[in-house]
Amino acid sequence: MPSLQTALPPELANNAIRLYRECLRRAKYIGSKVINSITHCPYSQQEQHNTELLVGMVRQQFKKHMHETDPDRIQKLKDDAARGLINHMLHESEKMTGRKFSQSS
């Protein structure tokens, strides 16, 4: 099975630390966007809590697997993280352009 990471820049996809940082950035972005779209208000404590929850989930997943040594398993974990980033980028692109990039069954 080919790696999903080819859709990301190689300096990001091949480096677990950079992938982790990008996942954290996306979690912070999503956390702030979700609550603002619901409440239609500026920064609030609920927004901060939502952001912290998402960031905590990302951290938990990376910490859970930080001692993994199997190269195939590491590749799968990196592919999963890349898939999450790609899905978010596609979602944001669809919102901006109004065009669907994926087909739903």
Image (cartoon, helix red, strand yellow):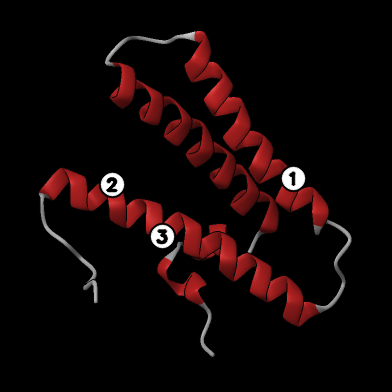
Point 87% across, 72% down: residue: 69
The image shows residue 43 at horizontal and vertical percentages of 42, 10
Point 60% across, 53% down: residue: 19
Direction from residue 86 to residue 90 in the image, left or right: left
Q: Is residue 89 above or below residue 45?
A: below
User: Which of marks 2 and 1 precedes in the sequence?
Assistant: 1
Query: Is disc 2 placed on a helix, strand or loop?
Result: helix
Indicate the amino acid at tag 2. Answer: Glu
Q: Residues within 10 Å of mark 1 (few under 14, many from 20)?
A: few
The image shows residue 103 at horizontal and vertical percentages of 21, 73
Q: Quadrant of residue 102?
A: bottom left
Task: State the separation of the CA atoms marked 3 and 1.
Answer: 20 Å
Query: Is disc 1 placed on a helix, strand or loop?
Result: helix
Point 48% across, 64% down: residue: 83
Point out which mark residue 60 bears: 1
Q: Nearer the viewer, residue 54 or 15?
A: 54
Q: Is residue 56 above or below residue 74?
A: above
Point out which mark residue 86 bears: 3
The image shows residue 70 at horizontal and vertical percentages of 84, 78
Q: Which residue is mark 2?
A: 92
Residue most toward the bottom?
A: 1
Image quarter (top left, top right, bottom left or bottom right) of the C terminus: bottom left
